[in-house]
Amino acid sequence: MDSFTTADMMGFLIFLPLVILLIYITLKYGGKYAKKLSQGKLIKVVEKVSLSQNSYIAIVLVDGKPYLMSGGEKGVQILKELDESVAEKIKDSNGQNNKFNFLKGWNINGKKEKL
């Protein structure tokens, strides 16, 4: 069994910062590239929230129509087709970091609730 030599330590000290730098660059610029790829598509995931390790709920725009969807081990299903007014709120809230804030005041039946 080889022992951990000075050459091994130097290699570790050289490549570890390089790997950390590559991870940083990927995280910083990779999201911008992925966003550019998704522009102009017919299907857009507006927001996705994990409910548990194996399930999530999402708001998805399909050709401009908003759907409330869920997914898990058994597959993906549409829970509800949302109102067109929700699509308008989604477009108005784009660019803001408001998770599901455009749904505030709406119940599952699409009727406006008093807040």
Image: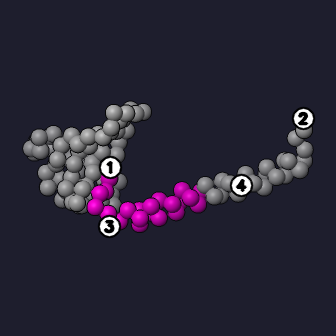
The residue that mark 2 highlights is 1
Q: Nearer the viewer, residue 96 or 20?
A: 20
Whole-Å distance between the Cαs marked 1 and 2? 52 Å
The residue that mark 4 highlights is 17
Q: Are marks 1 and 3 in contact (CB under 8 Å)?
A: no
Q: Are marks 3 and 2 in contact (CB under 8 Å)?
A: no
Going by the numbered disc 2, the residue's amino acid type is Met
Q: Residue at position x 27%, y 51% from top?
A: 60
Whole-Å distance between the Cαs marked 4 and 1? 34 Å
Whole-Å distance between the Cαs marked 1 and 3? 17 Å
Residue 66 vs residue 24: left or right?
A: left
Q: Nearer the viewer, residue 99 or 62?
A: 62
Q: Is residue 32 magenta?
A: yes
Q: Residue at position x 35%, y 65% from top?
A: 39
Q: Secondary structure at mark 3?
A: loop
Q: Is residue 43 magenta?
A: yes
Extreme front residue here? Answer: 74
Which of discs 1 and 2 lies nearer the camera? The answer is: 2
Q: Are marks 2 and 4 in contact (CB under 8 Å)?
A: no
Going by the numbered disc 3, the residue's amino acid type is Gly
Going by the numbered disc 1, the residue's amino acid type is Glu
- Residue 102 drawn at (x, y percent): 23, 51
